[in-house]
Amino acid sequence: AAFARWSRVDAAKEAELLRIAVDPARRGAGLARALLRVCEAELAATGIRDLHLEVRLSNAAARALYAGSGWRESGLRKGYYRDGEDAVLYAKRLG
């Protein structure tokens, strides 16, 4: 029903959340928020201190999820996506 992928840089104690996705038929049930909490806890337990991600500027649902989960906007990548849309960068301190 949902999955997440990340990439770790252990030497820097950082990770990037590459994707978090929920089956469209199951959206709105809190799965993304629960999965995000599990990912953050698992990464923190292995020594990761900082977590980063990027999301489409137009993805209001994802941006609300991250803002409501303690993430902060940390930058903007202009024209990042192939269609020219900007990416909003988010960061969260885990430890």
Image (cartoon, helix red, strand yellow):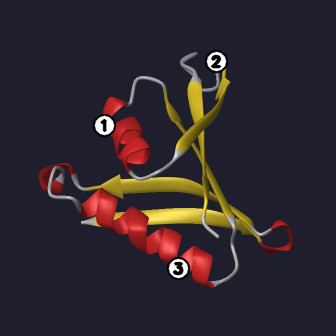
- Eyeballing the image, is 19 above or below 34? above
For the residue labelled by badge 3, is the local secondary structure a helix, a strand or a loop?
Answer: helix
Q: Residues within 10 Å of mark 1 (few under 14, many from 20)?
A: few
Distance (Cα) linking label 1 and label 2: 20 Å
Distance (Cα) linking label 3 and label 1: 24 Å
The residue carrying mark 3 is 42
The residue at the point 41 percent across, 37 percent down is 63
Q: As rendered, which of 34 and 5 lies closer to the eye?
A: 34
Q: Amino acid at mark 2?
A: Gly
Badge nearest the viewer, 2 or 3: 3
The residue carrying mark 2 is 79
- Eyeballing the image, is 51 above or below 63? below
Q: Amino acid at mark 1?
A: Ala
Which image quarter: residue 23? bottom left
Relative to residue 59, is residue 83 drawn left or right?
right
For the residue labelled by badge 2, is the local secondary structure a helix, a strand or a loop?
Answer: loop
For the residue labelled by badge 1, is the local secondary structure a helix, a strand or a loop?
Answer: helix
Q: Which mark is residue 61?
A: 1
